[in-house]
C-alpha cells in the first residue's frame, strides 16, 4: 500500500523567507510523487511531479522538490515566500500499475508580511 | 482552452436523497477520476474511468457509482445520502489514464452539503 505523511498541518513563514513543506512517502515499489496547491474554494493545481527522472524537480511559481529515496522524502521548497503563496499544499503518491492517487492531509501555508 | 468543468458548483440535499454530479474533461482527455475531499482532509480517490470503463475504485460504499459517456464526460451518483457525504467532490481528467506519469488536471469541484 502507498501513503504519504505531511509533517505540520500549518506552517507560517515571513514574506521573503524560505518555504519548506515536508512530505514522507511509503511505498513498496518506486513511486511517482506530486505536489499540488489548493487556493480557497478552488480545485487542485499541479506544482510539480517526480517520475523517476531527475531527483531534483522544478515546478511552477519558483517551487522545487527533491526526491530522496534513502529518506523516503519529497520535501517542497521555495527560496523566498510571497504573499500569493498562501494556500494549502498537498503531497500525493501514485505507484506504477495502479490508478489510485493517494493524497496527504495537507499543509496550510501562511505568509506573514 | 477550457479546463475541467464541473456542475453544479454547490448543492444542498437532505439525508436519504440521491445526487448526480457532472464533469466535463479537458478536450482530448479520455480519463476522468473522482475524488472526495472532506473539510480539513486531503482528497480521497473514489473512481477512475478510461474509455468508458472503470479502471480503479477506492474504498467507498456501493452507494457511490459513476459512469463515463462516449464524449468522455462523466457523472458521479450517490444514493441514500448521509451527513458524512458532505464534502467537496473533485473531478480530474488526464490524457490517457493508463500512463502513470500522466498529469491529472482538476476541476473547481462541487460542494455538496447534506442536511
Image (cartoon, rainbow, N blue to C red):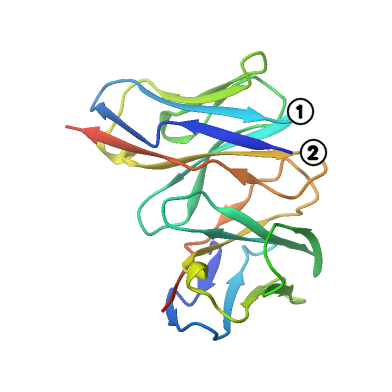
Label 1 CA crowd tier, 10 Å (few <14, some 14–19, many 20+): few
Q: Is residue B34 left or right of residue A47?
A: right
Above or below, A113 against B94 in this view is: above
Residue A29: x %, y % from top left = 79, 29
Which residue is at 73% across, 73% downward?
A: B68
Secondary structure under the numbered disc 1 in the rendered image: loop
Q: Position of residue A43 (x, y in %)?
A: 47, 56
Q: Quadrant of the N terminus of chain B?
A: bottom right
In the displayed structure image, the side of residue B1 where residue B102 appears, left or right: right
Residue B51 in sight in this render: no
Q: Is residue A91 left or right of residue A38?
A: right
Question: Any mark on residue A30, and which?
Answer: 1
Cα–Cα gap, marks 2 and 1: 8 Å
Q: Helix, strand, or loop for circle 2?
A: loop
Q: Residue at x 63, y 34 (%)?
A: A33
Q: Which chain is indicated by disc 2? A: A
Mark toward the start of the polypeptide (2 vs 1): 1
Q: Chain of mark 1?
A: A
Q: Is residue B42 visible?
A: yes
User: Looking at the rendered structure, which numbered label has been put on residue A96?
Assistant: 2
Amino acid at each position: 500500500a502507498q501513503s504519504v505523511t505531511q509533517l505540520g498541518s500549518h506552517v507560517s513563514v515571513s514574506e521573503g523567507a524560505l518555504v519548506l513543506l515536508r512530505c514522507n512517502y511509503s511505498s513498496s515499489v518506486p513511486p511517482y510523487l506530486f505536489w499540488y496547491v489548493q487556493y480557497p474554494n478552488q480545485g487542485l493545481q499541479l506544482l510539480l511531479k517526480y517520475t523517476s527522472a531527475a531527483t531534483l524537480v522544478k515546478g511552477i511559481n519558483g517551487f522545487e522538490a527533491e526526491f530522496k529515496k534513502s529518506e523516503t522524502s519529497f520535501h517542497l521548497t521555495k527560496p523566498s515566500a510571497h504573499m500569493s503563496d498562501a494556500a494549502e499544499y498537498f503531497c500525493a503518491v501514485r505507484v506504477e500499475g495502479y490508478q489510485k492517487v493517494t493524497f496527504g492531509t495537507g499543509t496550510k501555508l501562511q505568509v506573514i508580511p | 482552452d477550457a479546463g475541467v468543468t464541473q456542475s453544479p458548483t454547490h448543492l444542498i440535499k437532505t439525508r436519504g436523497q440521491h445526487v448526480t454530479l457532472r464533469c466535463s474533461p479537458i478536450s482530448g482527455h479520455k480519463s476522468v477520476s473522482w475524488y472526495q475531499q472532506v473539510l480539513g482532509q486531503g482528497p480521497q480517490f473514489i473512481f477512475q474511468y478510461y474509455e468508458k470503463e472503470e479502471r480503479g475504485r477506492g474504498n467507498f460504499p456501493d452507494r457511490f457509482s459513476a459512469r463515463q459517456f462516449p464524449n468522455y464526460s462523466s457523472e458521479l451518483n450517490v444514493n441514500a445520502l448521509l451527513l458524512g457525504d458532505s464534502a467537496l467532490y473533485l473531478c480530474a481528467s488526464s490524457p490517457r489514464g493508463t500512463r502513470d506519469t500522466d498529469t491529472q488536471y482538476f476541476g473547481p469541484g462541487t460542494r455538496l452539503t447534506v442536511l
